[in-house]
Image (cartoon, coloured by chain):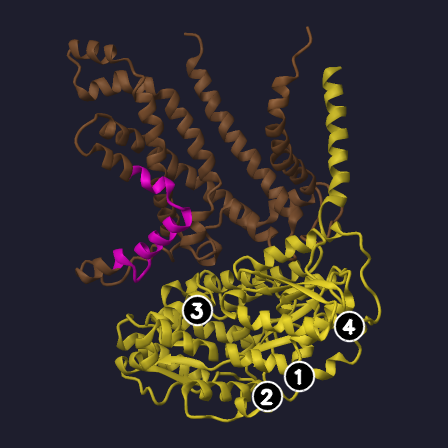
Amino acid sequence: MRIRDLASTGALALAALLAASGCGIGGAGDDTPALQGEVTGEADGEITFQTWNLKADYDDYFTALIAAFEEEHPGAAVRWLDQPAEGYAEKLSVDAAAGELPDVVNVAPDLVHPLAEAGLVLDLDRARPGAAGAYLPDAWAGFTMPGGSGTYAYPWYLNTGPIFYNRALFERAGLDPDAPPATYDELFEQAVAMAEATDGEVAMLGQTPGIVDLGLYGSEPMNPEGTEFTFNDAAAVELVGHYKDMYDAGALVPEALTQDYTGSGEQFMSGAIAWAPGSAYDLANFRTNAPTLYENVGITGVLTNTGQAHMYLQGLAVSARTAEPATAAAFAEFVTDAANQEAFAREVQIFPSTAGSLDDPYFTEDDGTDESRVRVAAAEQLATATSYTPVRFSDQMQNILRNEIALAMLGDKTPQEALDAAVEESNALLGTD
Amino acid sequence: MQAAPTPWLFLLPGLAACVVFSLYPFLNTVALAFTDARTISPGGFTGLDNFARMADDPRFWLALRNGTLYVIGVVPPLVLLPLLLALLVRDKGPGIGFFRTAFYTPVIASAVVVGLIWTWLLDSRGLVNGTLQALGVLSRPIPFLTDEWLLLASAMAVTIWKGLGYYMIIYLATLGRVPQELHEAAQVDGAGAVRRFLVVTLPAMRTTMTLIAALSAVSAFRVFTEIFILSGDTAGPGGRDITLVMLIREVSSGLDGHVGYGAALSLVLFGLTLGLLLSVLRLQAGRKGPR
């Protein structure tokens, strides 16, 4: 009898818990209906605006920007929130799950996709028809869902960059620092030569290839419908095979198997590796934090088999449940308009995504300094650049790819087996299993 | 007789905090484990699907293997070494305070700082490899952080190093309660220092050793920071050093995280650690039984 009572009580408790689980999690924390249709009206409400690790260095810029918006729109008030870089996606997911997404929020394309799928951010094509014309078409397309409809963030700033190389390390390996690799074949050849000449003390590369590298080499990361990843094609397999050869020759530092972009950058700054992709922003960083490297740094163009460099993209999304949609949309458009993006680009060494902005002499004329040379080259590169990171490629998938490629480097899997496994697992994550 | 309400009033704030911050999250996790919830979508009831998925997930088995190895590698040293340390610093003497503090310092150091220090030590261009190469002992660096097994061993070394001082303090407290007469009696009977340790000190320490074994085993199964910091968040080359907590974090985090699956993994981890704890305690109870 007692056992039966206990079982009944347990079953009831479990049922209650399961019922609670249906409403205790997820983006349904806020019952406000998602906005549909066009957003119009006066920008005179109070909104929150969240950036991604920008307060420390650009406080003055944003304070002035917000003041200018509030002056232009009497009655409007913007509360600025800034989140640290570390754990940004987690913070965003907590806000989204609680139904407390900021009214205007800084996002990268891969962060927008799940928010859009859950109906938490405005479809700007419907909410602000005609807004697209103000931005570069490729930048606008960067926030459009593949195979679907709708654009879910205003393009904000762009970045792309050259390759930096350490001239001193090239000389030490007997390589010509004035003739850095200009093709992939030259890179593979010189990387092995460098490892052999320095008896493995200096490596050319600090990282295994990621999704962007596969795309630059000629792989198609995803099908056009956005339903399946395809980065296990012949081009990708060939590139991973070359990396395996380089790894065996000692042309990659051992930490390459566990290292991300940041770790690779640190290895370049410390002189452990000779070749690293970067951006215009990095040059100032080298000058401040690695002066010896700065004196020896060489700058060369991005290697690509497609003719298109990679474009990093940031955007501003508007919450679909904001109480002040007109103010939020107007503020996002204000922050991302040509004048404000150009002003921000002068502060940060990034590039505006607004149509026509890159024609400004600041981005087209080289004044003889290294910074302007990198800036002009990068701006020129942006004219044809594209984003090789599919918007549906999450951090978890990135980790899976990195781990599978590490297994290929160790010889536990062939490049084809490793990429097949990464694609299979990533495709499984795409579903709602 | 009616119970006085005052004690309950005093207990109320603590109980409320316990319900809000411990009991409710736990019950919510139990509920989530039977759903396909994502981070920002509630999902629906899926029965035992998450547990079936776990059985087919090679990373789950890898995490289980690593957790088990971690327990085997960490628990014995954490039971024995702190006892030896406690014996060394038990007696008061000149400079003993310095040693006690030095041994305890890793305990209060942040796990992240400890991890970073060890990364600098063990990196292929770190202090250990650099020194050995400069001395001509090595021609190639030892891959402490890039080899599946060496990384696991390095993480264990960090865990042991960080835990020594904490368990040493527990032993010190117990050592102070061992009756001095027993030592004196054994000495009169002609027992030397080693024999006195074996027949007097060790039996007196048995309960504390069991407690430390249980605590360190549970901590070992839940290891995260050491491997996370040393491997740069990939869980080692090819993810081969993944642990259950790392797996839970990986599958549950981000905007499209599989929260339901993560909750199911958490439940399994809870069951494993509870089972481990109960086994150790039962073992101890068995020893105490009637003779």
CA neighbours of label 1 inside 10 A, class few (<14), some (14 to 19), many (20+)? some
Q: In this view, does B146 lie to the left or right of A85?
A: left
| C-alpha gap between disc 4 and disc 2 | 28 Å
Can residue B120 be found in the magenta stretch? Answer: yes
- Chain displayed in yellow: A
Front residue of B43/A321: it is: A321
Residue linked to disc 1 = A136
Q: In which quarter of the image is residue A123?
A: bottom right
Rendered location of residue A65, percent (x, y)? 62, 73
Q: Mark 2 lies on which chain?
A: A
Q: Residue furthest right?
A: A37
| Mark with earlier residue (1, 2) | 1
CA neighbours of label 2 inside 10 A, class few (<14), some (14 to 19), many (20+)? many
| Vertical side of B268 occupied by B2: above or below | above
| C-alpha gap between disc 1 and disc 3 | 31 Å
| Mark with earlier residue (4, 3) | 4
Are tags 4 and 3 found on a single chain? yes
Contact? badges 4 and 3 (CB < 8 Å):
no
Residue linked to disc 4 = A149
